[in-house]
Amino acid sequence: MKVMVTGGAGYIGSHVVKALLGSGYEVLVLDNLDKGHREAVVGGDFIEGDLADKELLDDIFSGHDIEGVIHLAAHSLVGESMEDPGKYYDNNVSRGLNLLEAMINNEVEYMVFSSTAAVYGEPEEIPITEEHPLQPTSVYGESKLFYEKILKRYDQIHGLQYTSLRYFNAAGADPRGEIGEAHEPETHLIPIVLQTVLGKRDELYIFGDDYPTRDGTCIRDYIHVNDLARCHILALEALIEGMPSRIYNLGNGEGYSVREVIKTAEKVTGQKIDAKIGKRRPGDPAALVASAEKAKEELDWKPEYPDLESIIESAWNWHSSGGFS
Ligand code: UFG
């Protein structure tokens, strides 16, 4: 069975591709390589192209027997989305719509969509369930929410079956060290901490220590990228077996503060890590922790890396061996 993965050369996408290949699927990756890395795609067919190209999309669907699409291609920086909203609405909504139209025109019925905890905005209660109010505070989160709404309508009107996976903080790397996280510029906490240890960065800042949390720093729910990846396959298989469209949170249900992440990284790397206290980063909620019970129950999904130490260990293994460079 052939599965198309948009954004398959990106951090999460490349781990999804590897997991699909490992489960015996044929894979076709579509990625414009704007942020992705060609070498991150460890197998399958690769097409360099953009979702803006409607003709290409039609060619792909008419030329390949694609059973379902895992759609990860998107811009994903909260800060950038607040400076250049048009870029986010265009890429994450309009171009994504081209993909849906091409799927409908070619009778491809199943989509697993890469959504985000950012659809919830500032949480009213922790842990966050899928029923939590949807009040995104960033254009990024809103663009993903718009797409979820479009998916709902395409289900009602065209019979498209979808699963939307709202990720919390994806982290870690392929345990075999073949692929990992390599953003340019890097904005995420764990790679920044590890790059500091490796001397690739001069300074590490904690963005605020006056939040109403146990140690004053922000709390996040870190989930191993391979656990995320496996859930995409479970979601796709459930759709194919006839499960109706659904939405799931994906996290471990356990929150760690920025200080706890740094402390765990010290343990994993065996090095003392100096961090300065900086200003709060605009738009950062104090705490984001998932309730992932629904995915666990309905998809029979169980994280294999539920603890922060093993997540950071896999990331350290990747970063300390040089990454893609
Ligand atoms: N942080 C620091 N110093 C840094 C980098 C991050 O203190 O140098 C802090 C942040 O303020 C935040 C925490 O570390 O409290 C985690 O930050 P990340 O940038 O790693 O992750 P975010 O929680 O900001 O982002 C994640 C996803 C986004 C998604 C967002 C939704 O990576 O894609 O959650 O809120 F949009």
Image: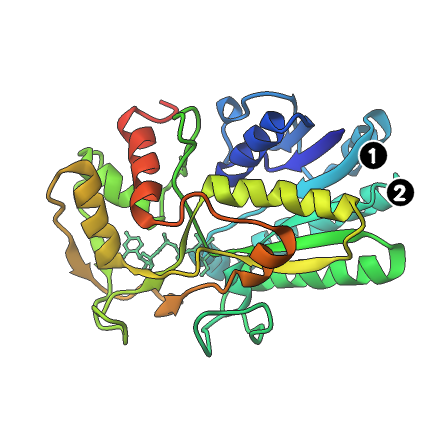
- Counting every numbered tag in the picture gives 2
The image quarter containing residue 318 is top left
- Left/right placement of residue 56 relative to residue 211 reads right
Q: Check disc 1 and report the residue beneath it.
A: 58
Q: Secondary structure at mark 2?
A: helix
Give whichever of discs 2 and 1 has the lower sequence position.
1
- Left/right placement of residue 10 relative to residue 161 reads left
Q: Which image quarter holds the N terminus?
A: top right
Dot 2 alpha-carbon crowd within 10 angstroms: few under 14, some 14 to 19, many 20 or more: few
Could you tell me if residue 186 is visible in this image? yes
Please tell me the numbered disc located at residue 314. Answer: none
* CB contact under 8 Å: marks 2 and 1: yes
Which of the pair 237/15 is nearer the observer?
A: 237
Q: Which image quarter holds the C terminus?
A: top left
Q: Check disc 2 and report the residue beneath it.
A: 105
Q: Is residue 136 above or below residue 257?
A: below
Q: Is residue 58 above or below residue 98?
A: above
Q: Is residue 324 above or below residue 118?
A: above
- Left/right placement of residue 53 relative to residue 314 reads right
The structure residue drawn at horizontal position 80% and vertical position 62%, both measured from the top left corner, is 153
**Residue 58 image position (x, y, % from top left):** 83, 34
Q: Secondary structure at mark 1?
A: helix
Q: Amino acid at mark 1?
A: Asp
The structure residue drawn at horizontal position 57% and vertical position 76%, both measured from the top left corner, is 133
Which of the pair 146/68 is nearer the observer?
A: 68
The image quarter containing residue 47 is top right
Q: Amino acid at mark 2?
A: Asn
Separation of residues labelled 2 and 1 (CA atoms): 8 Å
Could you tell me if residue 34 is visible in this image? no
The image quarter containing residue 88 is bottom right
Dot 1 alpha-carbon crowd within 10 angstroms: few under 14, some 14 to 19, many 20 or more: some
State which image quarter holds ligand 1: bottom left
